[in-house]
Image (tube, helix red, strand yellow):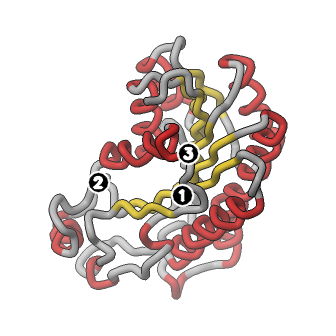
């Protein structure tokens, strides 16, 4: 479905981004893996093969770094058809309760996550305009659309930071804004909002979370692959400005 497509993925060596990188290659595409984690990026490049991917360290809060990422990716593969923004930088304060929030950590998270999403979008829109077409996909969360189910966190050390909801709802708004802003420019902008992804959560949390879902419960990162392949492919050519929720019915 993606033969001949070149996709740039930020956070491309992470839990979700790494899964996206693998499925793009599996479907015949090439990937420009962008990540701050050099070891993970180089390991994934070795796994998928230098003919299929290139790893480039990128800081999505820095214009020079983003532009370098795009430039080197284009030099390697000749073009960039699509970009997926999965980068998820977090401050040392990340995960603090609402009552314990400090301004410095809050500023860092809003700047690097929400500001980074805006800045990355800016550089991609400029690149796509020059190229004559493009496809940008953001990754938000169900908690950017719905409030957390706070009772699910009882009995655990986990929480759902208020800034996470603010950032992820902002990413949905960025998507809709840009889809409208880029009207008639042959640039599509969409978003996916996954539910929880398995990553070592405690049993007590998973039992409560899964009880709110329709069948499987909390998903593996690979469960998002069908949606991302669809949005990257020509089958979604008339899908624009949409936020697709993938949560096994958690939000019902």
Q: Which residue is mark 2?
A: 198
The residue singled out by tag 3 in the image is 237
Q: Residue furthest bottom?
A: 99
**Residue 91 in view, yes or no:** no
Write the residue at 26% across / 78% down: 152
Could one spot residue 174 in this view of the protein? yes
Helix, strand or loop for disc 1: strand
Q: Name the side, left or right, on which 158 lies relative to 51.
A: left
Residue 74 or residue 151, whichever sits in front: 74
Between the residue at mark 3 and the residue at mark 1, the CA separation in whole angstroms equals 14 Å
**What residue would you read off at disc 1?**
191
The x, y position of residue 14, in whole percent, is 47, 42
Q: Nearer the viewer, residue 135 or 205?
A: 135
- For the residue pair 30 and 209, the one nearer the viewer reads as 30
Tell me where residue 155 sits by quadrant. Answer: bottom left
Q: Position of residue 166 (x, y in %)?
A: 58, 75
Q: Secondary structure at mark 3?
A: loop
Mark 3 is surrounded, within 10 Å at the Cα level, by few (under 14), some (14 to 19) or many (20 or more) other residues, namely few
Q: Residue at x 57, y 54 (%)?
A: 138
Characterize the local packing of mark 1: few (<14), some (14-19) or many (20 or more) Cα atoms within 10 angstroms. Answer: many
Q: CA distance from mark 2 to mark 1?
A: 20 Å
Element at badge 2? loop
State which quarter of the image contains the N terminus: top left
């Amino acid at each position: 479905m993606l033969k001949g497509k070149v996709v740039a993925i930020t956070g491309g060596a992470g839990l979700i981004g790494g899964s996206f990188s693998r499925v793009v290659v599996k479907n015949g595409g090439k990937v420009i893996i962008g990540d701050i984690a050099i070891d993970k990026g180089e390991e994934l490049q070795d796994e998928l093969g230098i003919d299929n991917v290139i790893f480039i360290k990128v800081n999505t809060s820095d214009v020079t770094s983003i532009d370098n990422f795009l430039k080197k990716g284009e030099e390697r593969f000749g073009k960039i058809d699509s970009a997926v923004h999965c980068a998820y930088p977090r401050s040392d304060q990340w995960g603090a309760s609402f009552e314990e929030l400090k301004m410095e950590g809050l500023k860092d998270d809003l700047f690097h996550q929400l500001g980074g999403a805006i800045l990355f979008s800016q550089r991609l829109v400029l690149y796509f305009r020059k190229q004559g077409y493009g496809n940008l996909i953001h990754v938000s969360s169900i908690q950017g659309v719905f409030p957390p189910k706070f009772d699910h966190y009882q009995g655990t050390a986990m929480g759902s930071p208020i800034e996470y909801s603010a950032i992820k709802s902002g990413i949905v708004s960025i998507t809709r804004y840009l889809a409208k802003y880029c009207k008639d420019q042959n640039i599509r902008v969409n978003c996916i909002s996954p539910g929880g992804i398995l990553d070592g959560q405690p049993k007590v949390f998973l039992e409560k979370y899964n009880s709110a879902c329709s069948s499987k419960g909390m998903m593996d990162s690979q469960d998002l692959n069908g949606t991302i392949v669809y949005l990257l492919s020509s089958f979604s050519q008339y899908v624009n400005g949409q936020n697709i929720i993938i949560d096994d019915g958690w939000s019902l």
